[in-house]
Image (cartoon, rainbow, N blue to C red):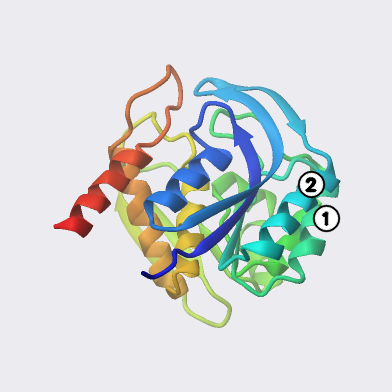
């Protein structure tokens, strides 16, 4: 039996289960990976917004990372919400010693609009972007990072997520240094149940890379998973509801067994 790819997620917890560590675990599991976690912050949130955030001590975060890597190891790492500049720098210090691909989702603002990264934390993202095999900003995050010109100046690989842009077509652009951009376009899925789309996409891509897929194939797998999960959303909550990770996983299981 082939062992599942080992995916370490370094991110915050979402009490409502729609985003953050909870969405990461669901995504990785449904795509056949083995999820491990280093929780950076605990949030109290639901589909209507974030009501409290508490970052965990840096030492405890590093202890979680060390515990996973020293025993089980990792085939890919996904980074999400970090919580502070100190945490971002400490995580960068640890990951400088890691050889597997890293997917960095530069979480700054929740779907509900809550700010999850201050200016100091965003400045510390520079180190993580240099370490990552792929950085996955959405439209507001891309603007905060200097736009396409800023990303080009860094000479890094990045995926511009277009879900936050306006219009009937969603466009995602994969930019790899020295190569022509790859562009995916698809009709917008009209739904308010979009909580955790960024977390889900980054974790799906990390799982694909951990499975040995090339970057473009991993992005394609991630996009397909997110779109299927949007269509399968269970309809929970009065605001931006969660995706239907489990329904997609069940469908994948049925296809695998048929």
Residue occupying the far left of the picture: 258
Which residue matches tag 2?
Answer: 121
> For mark 1, what is the residue?
90
Circle 1 sits in a helix, a strand or a loop, which is it?
helix
Q: Foreground residue, 192 or 86?
A: 86
Residue 28 lies, in percent from the top left, at 46, 52
Q: Residue 95 location, x and y as percent?
A: 74, 65
Q: Nearer the viewer, residue 22 or 66?
A: 66
Residue 119 visible? The answer is yes
Q: Can you say which quadrant of the picture contains the C terminus?
A: bottom left
Q: Is residue 54 left or right of residue 44?
A: right
Left or right of 226 in this view: 209: right
Residue 152 location, x and y as percent? 64, 70
Residue 164, labelled with which disc? none
> Residue 68's spot in the image, x, y percent?
67, 57
Quarter of image, res 157? bottom right
Sort mark 1 into few (<14), some (14-19) or many (20+) by Cα contacts within 10 Å: some
> Which structural element holds mark 2?
helix
């Amino acid at each position: 039996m082939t062992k599942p790819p080992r995916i370490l997620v370094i991110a915050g917890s979402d009490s409502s289960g729609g985003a953050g560590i909870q969405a990461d675990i669901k995504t990785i599991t449904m795509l056949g990976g083995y999820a491990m976690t280093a929780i950076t912050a605990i949030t109290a949130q639901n589909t209507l917004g974030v009501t409290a955030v508490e970052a965990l001590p840096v030492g405890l975060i590093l202890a979680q990372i060390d515990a996973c890597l020293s025993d089980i190891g990792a085939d890919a790492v996904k980074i999400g919400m970090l919580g502070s500049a100190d945490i971002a720098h400490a995580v960068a210090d640890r990951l400088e010693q890691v050889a597997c691909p890293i997917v960095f989702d530069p979480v700054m603002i929740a779907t509900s609009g809550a700010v999850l990264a201050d200016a100091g934390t965003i400045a510390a993202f520079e180190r993580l972007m240099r370490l990552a095999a792929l950085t996955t900003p959405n439209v507001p995050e891309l603007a905060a990072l200097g736009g396409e010109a800023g990303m080009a100046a860094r000479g890094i690989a990045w995926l511009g997520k277009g879900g936050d842009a306006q219009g009937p077509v969603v466009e995602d652009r994969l930019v790899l240094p020295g190569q022509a951009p790859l562009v995916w376009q698809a009709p917008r899925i009209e739904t308010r149940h979009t909580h955790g789309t960024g977390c889900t996409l980054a974790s799906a891509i990390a799982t694909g890379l951990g499975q040995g897929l090339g970057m473009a194939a991993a992005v394609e797998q991630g996009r397909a998973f997110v779109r299927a999960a949007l269509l399968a959303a269970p309809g929970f909550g009065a605001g931006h509801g969660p995706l239907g990770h489990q329904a997609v996983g069940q469908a994948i299981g049925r296809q695998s067994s048929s």
